[in-house]
Image (tube, helix red, strand yellow):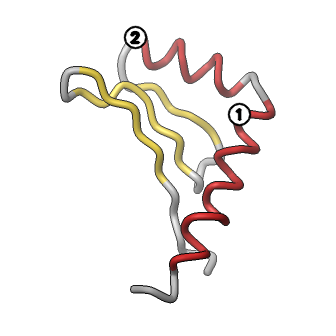
Amino acid sequence: LKDIQYIFSMYYNKLETARFDSNLGKYVGYTEYGVKQANYWNSNPSEISVRRAQREAYCLHNIGID
């Protein structure tokens, strides 16, 4: 169960701008705008805790299906 990775990606015009990676535990930006957004989201502890909870709620809940 430790190997499960939850990734939440944001796209604009088919270009990935930012991503939350559960292995890193934070957002990472891939464009200038995405970096600014990632810094903003990373500074908000409630946003980070929501994404960490999504890993457990979505991934761990559905692991038996596949």
Query: Residue 32, labelled with which disc?
Result: 2
Residue designated by label 1: 47
Q: Residue at x 61, y 60 (%)?
A: 55
- Name the foreground residue: 48 vs 66: 66
Q: CA distance from mark 2 to mark 1?
A: 20 Å
Quarter placement of the N terminus: bottom right
* Relative vertical location of residue 33 with respect to residue 39 in this rendering, above or below: above
- The number of discs equals 2
Q: Residue at x 53, y 71 (%)?
A: 4
User: Pointer 2: residues within 10 angstroms few (<14), some, or many (20+)?
Assistant: few
* Relative vertical location of residue 55 with respect to residue 64 in this rendering, above or below: above
Looking at the rendered structure, the secondary structure element under dot 1 is helix
Horizontal side of residue 17 vs 59, given as left or right: left
Q: Position of residue 18 (x, y in %)?
A: 43, 29
Query: Residue 27, labelled with which disc?
Result: none
Q: Are marks 2 and 1 in contact (CB under 8 Å)?
A: no
Horizontal side of residue 50 vs 15, given as left or right: right
